[in-house]
Image: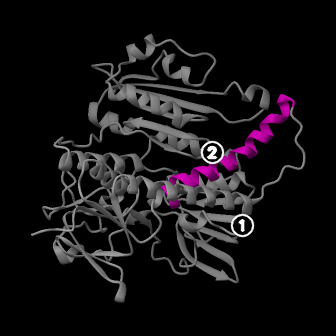
Amino acid sequence: MAFDYDLLTIGAGSGGVAATRRAGNYGARTAICEKDQVGGTCVLRGCIPKKLLVYASRFAEELEDSVHFGWSISDASMDWPTLIKNKNLELERLNIIYKKLLSDANVDLIEGTATLVDSHTVAVGAGKGLRRVTSETILLATGGWPVKPSIAGLEPAMTSTEALDLLKLPEHLVILGGGYIAVEFAGIFSKLGVKVTEVVRADNILRGFDEDIRRHLQKEMSRQDVSIRSSATVECVDNDHGVYHIRLSDGDVIEADGLLCAMGRAPNTWGLGLERVGVDITENGAVRVDEWSRTSVANIYAVGDCTDHVNLTPVAIAEGRALADTLYNNDPKKVDYKNIPSAIFSHPEVGTVGLTEKEARERFGEIKVYRSEFRPLKATISGNGGRTMMKLLVELETEKIIGCHMVGDGAAEIVQGLAIALKCGATKRQFDATMAIHPTASEEFVTMYEPLLENVG
């Protein structure tokens, strides 16, 4: 059978674009289907716009810190509409760039909603505009989407998608959730002058992260006037002409003019027709794949957040590129999921790579833990009360570094470098032998001398 394409991708986000573009550059006949702008969640509704808002929010602290360094800045104010306008201009520029990247790789862009007809056929569009396209291989790269739990009255609440395009800042914002999206938006809006209350079901924010990260960040956020209501759930929400009344499980009612639901994301696979063609999915709609990103249907693959594996943009890109190399460059590749670094662009920032202390103890039993908490040099003059926390986990037998964690300014940039060391199997002795750059915060990672706990199971 002659197909229209060698590779047809559904979803023009980071993973889909990476795979299709690389396959096109290898000479494969490729196309990509997208119902929205090209770029996906990361470029349009996630990483990039969120980081731009983070940058904006950090100026508030910089202005405060500048006073004791001799600066006199009066009448500084935030113009939210200007920020959103300029953010959107940047997203439009990126959308154009992404389209050009696809065009330069000879990838056909097919605009419209795509559904699977059979294992080699995709229907794009609807009604008279419906178009059927065939392909030898189909790649699912539809990402994820914010979800809301079944709580009475929660329907009008915004998600992270709408929060990036608010027409004006609320006076009081309640954020439901304790994950990285929730804490990032808590920092953004709080620094921009909004009263923020974060409602967390668990005993602390960031469930699944290292306990010292969780405790330290929550302490710092509370110091910066973010009110965190731990061990609380929402019973119901009433909306009275734009004023939310949020009833908690302990009986308290919080009144606010803004409500953000950041209680998780789900694979964006609904309506794709996966069941029709026999693609196996999990209970939450994630596409099941093997180590080669292949689904239960031999010629259909999936990468990125729609697999609900490791939901990070660089992982989706790596999966997409590995797939293209395997199928179209005679270079079989699997993605290595060990020691994937990640960051939370909170206030202050978090960077982490490797195992948490709990994971390390469960795996190795006895480990060494090094931890340092200190006042940054800048704060000695600025008067900022924030403190930085750094932590190293070391395997007892081999002295290998198995976890690096940081809360503080520059955490993401610092931990990205440490991730290379972990990937190379660096030991504590090699960290100790590395000359420090002084004065920096990062030097603490190569000067921590005494372990807090030794030979403790």
User: Can you give x and y, in whole percent of width and height, for residue 375 in the image?
Assistant: 67, 27
SS assignment at label 2: loop
Residue 88 visible to an observer of this rendering: yes
User: Which residue, given by chain and number where applicable, does mark 1 sit on?
Assistant: 170
**Where in the figure is residue 76, as x and y percent of width and height?**
84, 49
| Element at label 1 | loop
Quadrant location of the C terminus?
Answer: top left
Callout 2 touching callout 1 (CB < 8 Å): no
Q: Name the mark on residue 20.
A: none
Where's residue 442, x and y in %?
55, 24
Query: What is the CA distance from the residue labelled 2 to the residue labelled 1?
Result: 19 Å
Per the rendered image, the range of residues in magenta is: 43-70
In screen coordinates, is 249 left or right of 99? Answer: right
- How many residues crowd around disc 1 within 10 Å: few (fewer than 14), some, or many (20 or more)? some
**Residue for badge 2:** 347
Q: Position of residue 3 (x, y in %)?
A: 17, 68
Amino acid at the residue labelled 2: His
Asked whether 416 falls inside the magenta stretch, the response is no
Q: Quadrant of residue 106?
A: bottom left
Q: What colouring style does the render use? A: one colour
In this view, 227 is above or below 383: below
Q: Earlier in the sequence, mark 2 or mark 1?
A: 1
**What's the amino acid at mark 1?**
Pro
